[in-house]
Image: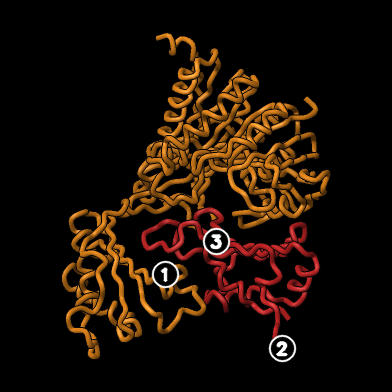
Chain colours: A red, B orange
Amino acid sequence: MRNMPRLRDLASTVRSKNAGVDHITFDIIFRERANFERVRDAKVITPEVVCRLLRITPDRITDFVVFEPANAIKFTIRRERPSGSPGERDVFGSQQYAPLLDLEVP
Amino acid sequence: MAEVTILCPTGHLGFTPLEKDSFLAGCELKPDFIIADSGSCDIGPYPLGADGQASPESWQRHDLEIMLLAARRLGVPMIVGSASDTGTDRGVEQYVRLIQDIAAEHGLAPFRLAAICSELSREAVLARMAAGAKVRGLDGRPDADPALIQRTDRIVAVMGAEPIAAALREGADVVIAGRASDCALFAAPILNAGMSEATAYYAGKLMECASFCCEPFMGKESILGRIAEDDIRITAMHPGQRCTPASLASHAMYERRDPFREHVLSGTVDMSACRYEQLDEKTTRASGARWIPAAQPMAKLEGAGKVGERRLAIVGMREPYMIANIDTAIAWARARLHERFGAPEEAGWQVFYHLYGRDGVMGPMDPAPPANPHELGIVVEALCGDARRAEEICALAARNLFYARLPEVKGTAGAAALMSDEVLAGKPGYEWTLNHVIPVASATELFRTRFLAVDGTTRKAA
């Protein structure tokens, strides 16, 4: 199992961003259809994986979609508190995707 | 009109200055409308709550000037929505003033300006609630009660295309709108041309962020949309960008929970059956949107309320033992704060320690915070209703790290490094209190339109 590629090697875009004031949405987009299908079919990204990776409970995942027209996998999580409230760490929600980059793809 | 062409130069007017070259290239193609959104919730609740802008006025003016001069030269309408970041009445009036100033400065011939306000007073919302209107929470929030409205400092309702379309039909050459759905700005002229809501709002959704729907990634570059019924063609205007099926489809899901549905005041655009095809090197065609009219039109309300005054301090840490035991040190510091100022909830204060170098960006969501970072940068954030008290709490929250009593600290002259022994004044803390919808009988009833004649020639002479 050495040299298994990581998500960062196969996806062309991995991003997170506010979706309204109460959610952060994550998009993983592939330029190559084959890479998209490989990650999709190997179930590299599932709600269970997201819960484990971001250390959140399943009820915080509000949406999970395989978006075929864009060769993309997309999921959305509820924020701990509305964006920009006191104690905010990431007003735009734009740096929360980092842990996804190292996911291994069989 | 069988086809409407729209030029969009920026996804957030004024946030950073737009790029002029691709915009002027788009103007060469003689668009029928020039349209840009100027607002966002991404900037956090402070600008709405405090009714301030998030962008420098000189950048807003820069963008408005380039758009206005082109629109008047081409003789086509210009539409700007969510004026000055928040779309409050302040934002609308500021942009009206800027348009008047730019017209005067350039001696522009007379034109008609429509200003559409969308701010709602607390009293207006409370009166609707008292009359039986249910202000329903979105995204899992509870419905609003009067107490929630009372602690909201400022409220805007989000308009759909209808008030803007009406202003255009009445001959507006420039529309400055308060808070509006981004896509509604584009939908308004498309609806006036007789096309369906599906085509109109879908085209708007695709175009609202300008060059973000093209590749490679570039901000603030123009795109041109040629819109016919169920046939939306988007072209990148920057020589180095292309609009591709992948870039356009991936934009359709940008910054939204659900890639298939876009909700506006009078209904929902269903994008689940949309198709994308490359037409030429720089152009992609989109089609297949469906429209689901709302059984009960609902206007979205955005509101922000003040939490307290905010103070910040910056502390560094290098000693490995302190770093390894930082949570214990923070607990010790918090206990001292509690002793002096009382329990946070009862005494009305909050302190946050942001641990940059460990999990400052992700907090509890970080799957692998390092156990032994080389050094820590700690931002102490304190909030309290009273400014002097906030300052005192922040100072003590920071200095208590300096004096933290842990048994094995070797450096007894200070357990932390102070970048400077000072407390910085942050902007007051606000929170998004309203992310709700309210039922409306008509799509225009919450919005107030007034027309102004702008004559740059007389003002210049005066």
Q: Residue at x 21, y 84 (%)?
A: B411
Q: Residue at x 26, y 73 (%)?
A: B417
Q: Is residue B101 left or right of residue A41?
A: left
Instruction: Give the camera-side residue of B227 and B30.
Output: B30
Disc 3 marks which amino acid?
Answer: Ile
Q: Residue at x 57, y 62 (%)?
A: A16
Report which residue position mark 1 lands on.
B360
Per the model, the C-alpha gap separating discs 3 and 2 is 33 Å
User: Which residue is the extreme one toward the bottom?
Assistant: B408
SS type, badge 1 = loop
Q: Chain of mark 3?
A: A
Disc 3, disc 2: CB below 8 Å?
A: no
| Image quarter of residue B354 | bottom left
SS type, badge 3 = strand
Disc 2 marks which amino acid?
Answer: Met
Report which residue position mark 3 lands on.
A24
Compared with B237, B312 (above or below) is below
Whether labels 1 and 3 belong to a single chain: the reply is: no
Whether labels 2 and 1 belong to a single chain: the reply is: no
Instruction: Give the camera-side residue of B24 and A104.
Output: B24
Q: Tell me, yes or no, if residue B293 can be seen here.
A: no
Q: Nearer the viewer, mark 3 or mark 2?
A: 2
Per the model, the C-alpha gap separating discs 1 and 3 is 17 Å
Q: Residue at x 50, y 49 (%)?
A: B436
